[in-house]
Amino acid sequence: MIVSSIKTFGKYCMFMTQVFRIPDKWRVFFSNLLFEINKLGVDSIPLVLIISLFIGAVICIQMTLNIVSPLIPSYSTGLATREILLLEFSSTMMCLILAGKVGSNIASEIGTMRVTEQIDAMDIMGINSANYIVMPKILGFVLFVPVLCVFSMFFGLVGGWFIAEFTSMLTVENYIFGIQSFFNEWYVWYGIIKTVVFAFLITSIAAFYGYYVKGGALEVGKASTNAVVSSSILILLADVILTKLLLE
């Protein structure tokens, strides 16, 4: 198990050295980069917004129902909602969700290219297939994921505002005062830094599993599953390490 893991990690590192090389044609690279930003990033906006709205609303409801002590100020609901969204949901939880959408998409797409011998054809023509196919995906998602993180933070808070506005659980004034109280700007940057690291893990691991698929359609499905599971585990591990480093 340990030896196999070390071999896989070594193979992954060698794969990354293939990926991050100077492109042969910059015009083609930037064209592919814009395409991947649109496909992996922009197309993920509706999913991020919908989930963030509902999660923000649920967090606000849970905080209101559970913070009932007269010793706790009424604006604590907004404050707690903001901290949960900034510190964990809009970075870690959102990337775990995107690992399923983006990771499986990349792994299945590259895996299909491998089993249909498109990648082999590129290699025969002297094209660095790993660089041509994978680098635009990694850089495209890494560059756009901070936008998704900020959107998630904002619309999560909007979801909490809907609860304050359209229910009698708490007042809008207390909610807004809570999300403004004791604001720490570093928490926003902390969330963005984490999402950038997580985006790299999602795309690079998914591309690795897809690139080295052997077999047919069944193996492509297995590669997609393995990519999502592996990236999810490593996201949680990286979350612990980054939290220790960035918030200490």
Image: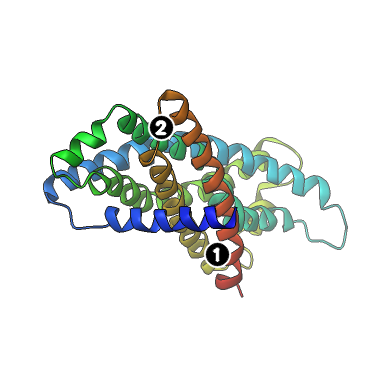
Q: Residue at x 40, y 34 (%)?
A: 214
Residue 58: x %, y % from top left: 69, 40
Is residue 45 visible in the rendered image? The answer is yes
Is residue 183 visible in the rendered image? The answer is no
Assess disc 1: are there few (<14), some (14-19) or many (≥20) residues with their C-alpha within 10 Å of its C-alpha.
some
For marks 1 and 2 on the same chain, the one whose residue lies earlier in the sequence: 2
**Residue 74: quadrant of the picture:** bottom right
Task: Judge whether 53 appears above or below 115 on screen.
Answer: below
Q: Residue at x 82, y 53 (%)?
A: 67
- Judged left or right of residue 196, residue 229 is right
Q: Which mark is residue 108?
A: 2
* Residue hosting label 1: 187
Q: What kind of element bears circle 2?
A: helix
Q: Quadrant of the C terminus?
A: bottom right
Q: Residue at x 88, y 58 (%)?
A: 70
Residue 14: x %, y % from top left: 35, 57
Residue 112: x %, y % from top left: 35, 29
**Is 245 or 183 nearer to us in this picture?**
245
Furthest residue toward right: 70
Residue 117: x %, y % from top left: 27, 30
